[in-house]
Each structure stands twice: as C-alpha cells, then as structure tokens.
C-alpha cells in the first residue's frame, strides 16, 4: 500500500514539475505573442506538430525532431507568405494550419504502430517520465537563455519594427530566433498539454497578466505566476474529479482570466 502511494505521489510530482517548467517559458514567450498579435501564428505551429509526430513515426525518427522540422518549415512558409501579401495573413494562417493538422492525421493513419491521438491532441501530463523532465529542463534552459539574449531587440521590434531597423536590430534574425523558440516550446510541450492546447497556455496567462502589469518584464513574470497557479489548480481538479489533466489546466487558466476581467472592470 505504501509503495503504491509513493508511486502515485511520484507521478503527480513529475506532472507538477513538468507543468511548472512549461509555464516558466510559455509566460515570457506568450507576452510577445500577445503584443505582436500572433495568436493564430502560434496555433498554426502547434497544429503542424501533429504532422511532425506522424512523420517521426513513419520515418522511425524521434518525434521531437519531426516536430521541430515541421514547425520550423511551417514558420518559414508563414513568413514567406506574409511578405508576398497576395492573401491576407489570417487566410494563409488558416489554410496552412488546418492543412498541416489534417495531413498529419492522414499520415498517422498509415503508421503501423498504434498511436493515442487523444494524448497528442490534448496531452497526457500524468504520463511524464523523469527522462521527459530532463528533456523539458534542457528546453527550458535553452529557451530562457536565448530569450534573455534577444529580449531587448525583440521588444524593440515589437514596439516599432522600422525604428528597430534604424537602431541596427537585425529584424529577420531576431524574428527567426523567436519563431524557433516557439517551435522548441511546442516540441517539448506536446506530451504535456497537447497540440490543440499549447497556444492557450501561451495566450491566456499573458492576457490575464496584461491588465495588472506596468512593464514588459513585470508582465512576463506575472504571466508565469498565473500559469503556475493554473497548473496547480488544474492538476488538483484532475486528481479530485478525475478529469483530463491538460484541459483542466487550460480551464483553470481561463477561470483566472475571467476573474481578472471581473476584478479589473470593478476597479
């Protein structure tokens, strides 16, 4: 009985650590998605992750590598389509996003190995292993390190792109690095929150923090705090009522956003 309890405590601890690590990087990245009005862009990258997983199984390579390849390819296609401006950016985002998701599901049907689509779409944070935590930890260190390095130029081009160019910011390089960071985040968060819910964890905590922050750094920190509270509330609800962990975290995050709006409106 004691061994069973210890085993249960162990997987809950792993899930909690994975969720907290994820919001540690989703918070700072999410504030830029909000400021740059890139919500649908993040959604398109997360949808393309399904295609990456399918290609990973089909080609017998690590699915994280497959996710990185497809998300980076998707980002390049989106950036090129925005430059040509033959169609509206939202139109191209919709076409590429849903095409990648549908193609991924089709390719998945040819995979001989049985794949849990629900886990891919909505995540399975309770199945995170210690090995997964090491991978997530490495991703967190990488993303935070690169983000700290590009923070000022990224903030500058977010505020005013043309002014950033005048100041000597390499806009193309900084934008590419930021997109790569989102791709890495999607790759390491697939198992935790799922392809369909990744963007919500990027956007909702940042949107919650926006009203109560006076500086970009403060908004990033508060976004992380909101995300961590959502993870703890979501996991607690999942344990208490036996609900899916990933969606429970997102619902908890949405609840915090609703409270922030009510508090803000009354203030």
Image (spheres, rainbow, N blue to C red):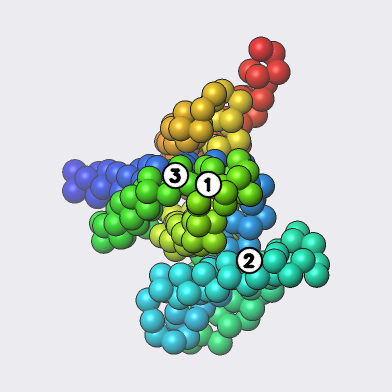
The residue beneath circle 3 is 151
Q: Secondary structure at mark 2?
A: helix
Count how many numbered circles sit on residues in the image: 3
Residue at image position (41%, 70%) is 64
Q: Which image quarter is the C terminus in?
A: top right
**Can you tell which of label 2 and label 1 is closer to the viewer?**
1
The answer to which image quadrant residue 92 occupies is bottom right
Residue at image position (46%, 32%) is 217
Which dot marks residue 167? 1
User: Is residue 242 positioned above or below 63 on the image?
Assistant: above
| 49 left or right, relative to 57 | right
The answer to which image quadrant residue 152 occupies is top left
Task: Give the spatial CA distance, label 2 vs label 3.
Answer: 20 Å
Classed neighbour count for the residue bearing mark 1: other residues with Cα under 10 Å, few (<14), some (14–19), many (≥20): few
| 123 left or right, relative to 105 | left
Mark closest to the chain's N terminus, 3 or 1? 3
Residue at image position (80%, 67%) is 87
Task: Give the spatial CA distance, label 3 vs label 1.
Answer: 15 Å
Task: Give the spatial CA distance, label 2 vs label 1.
Answer: 22 Å
Which of the pair 77/158 is nearer the observer? 158
The answer to which image quadrant residue 88 occupies is bottom right
The residue beneath circle 2 is 79
Do the numbered discs 3 and 1 sit on residues whose CB atoms are within 8 Å? no
């Amino acid at each position: 009985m004691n061994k069973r309890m210890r085993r249960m405590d162990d997987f809950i601890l792993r899930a909690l650590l994975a969720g907290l690590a994820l919001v540690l990087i989703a918070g700072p990245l999410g504030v830029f998605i909000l400021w740059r009005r890139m919500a649908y862009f993040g959604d398109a990258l997360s949808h393309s992750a399904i295609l990456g997983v399918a290609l990973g199984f089909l080609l017998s390579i690590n699915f994280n590598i497959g996710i990185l390849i497809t998300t980076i390819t998707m980002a390049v296609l989106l950036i090129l389509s925005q430059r040509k401006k033959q169609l509206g950016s939202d139109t191209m985002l919709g076409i590429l996003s849903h095409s990648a998701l549908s193609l991924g599901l089709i390719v998945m049907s040819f995979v001989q190995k049985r794949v849990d689509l629900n886990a891919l779409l909505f995540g399975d944070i309770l199945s995170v292993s210690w090995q997964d935590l090491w991978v997530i930890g490495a991703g967190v260190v990488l993303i935070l390190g690169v983000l700290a390095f590009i923070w000022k130029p990224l903030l500058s081009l977010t505020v005013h792109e043309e002014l950033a160019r005048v100041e000597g910011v390499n806009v193309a390089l900084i934008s590419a690095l930021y997109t790569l960071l989102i791709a890495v985040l999607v790759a390491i968060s697939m198992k935790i929150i799922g392809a369909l819910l990744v963007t919500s964890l990027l956007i909702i905590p940042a949107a919650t923090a926006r009203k109560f922050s006076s500086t970009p750094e403060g908004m990033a920190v508060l976004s992380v705090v909101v995300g961590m509270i959502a993870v703890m509330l979501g996991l607690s609800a999942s344990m208490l009522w036996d609900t899916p962990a990933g969606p429970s975290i997102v619902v908890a995050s949405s609840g915090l956003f609703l409270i922030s709006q009510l508090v803000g409106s009354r203030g």
